[in-house]
Amino acid sequence: MRKILLLLCFLFVFGCGYQPIFSSKDANFIIGKIDFDKSDKISLKISNGLNYLKQNENYSKILKVQLNSKKTINISSKDAKGNPSVFQMIINTNIQIYSDDKMLKQKNISKSFSYKNTEKKFDLTQYEKTIEDNLINSIKEDIILILYN
């Protein structure tokens, strides 16, 4: 009985026809070039995440993407002594999509996250890097949705 149940579960999971929604095989475009300011580390990370869209054999359009990103960290609240207790990290990205030197789309994407201050500055720095990576991944997913629509 247990083997039959395991077999049915296996067939259900692998036989359901699962396919990733946004894979480079299904795209009718490729990204020919991604432009950004070389000192913009956030746009560099986004660009590296979009590199798989530069390789496709069945495409009808070549897109050029221009990125401009900015990260700000604001103090949301302070304690009774005036020390910061809550920070808010905001990443703003402006994306412009071109095809044949004509702008197809322009979109501003803004993501934010609030977090508490810690006494250990090394731990705070590591936590901020994790938050930044998560926000960048969220922005990258939004950009992919924009490109496919």
Image: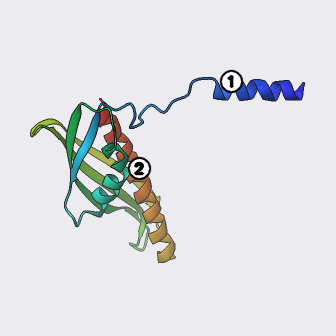
Residue 39, percent across and down?
A: 23, 67
Residue 78, percent across and down?
A: 40, 66
Q: How was the colour assigned to the protein in this rendering?
A: rainbow
Could you say which is closer to the camera, residue 52 or residue 104? 52
User: Quick one: SS at disc 1?
Assistant: helix
**Count of marks overlaid on the render:** 2
Q: Residues within 10 Å of mark 1 (few under 14, many from 20)?
A: few
Residue 52, percent across and down?
A: 37, 46
Q: Amino acid at mark 2?
A: Asn
Q: Amino acid at mark 1?
A: Phe
Give the image quarter of residue 15: top right
Give the image quarter of residue 74: bottom left
Distance between the alpha carbons at the discs numbered 1 and 2: 31 Å
User: Quick one: SS at disc 2?
Assistant: helix
Look at the picture and state if 135 lies above or below 24.
below
The disc, 1 or 2, on the residue closer to the chain's N-terminal end is 1
Does 2 sit left or right of 113 as displayed? right
Q: Quadrant of the C terminus?
A: top left
Q: Which residue is mark 2?
A: 137
Q: Please report the residue visible at 40 percent of the width from the left and 72 percent of the height from the top.
A: 83
Does 3 sit left or right of 141 as displayed? right
Q: Please report the residue visible at 40 percent of the width from the left and 59 percent of the height from the top.
A: 132
Q: Please report the residue visible at 43 percent of the width from the left and 64 percent of the height from the top.
A: 128
Q: Quadrant of the N terminus?
A: top right
The label on residue 119 is: none
Q: Which residue is mark 1?
A: 12
Q: Residues within 10 Å of mark 2 (few under 14, many from 20)?
A: some
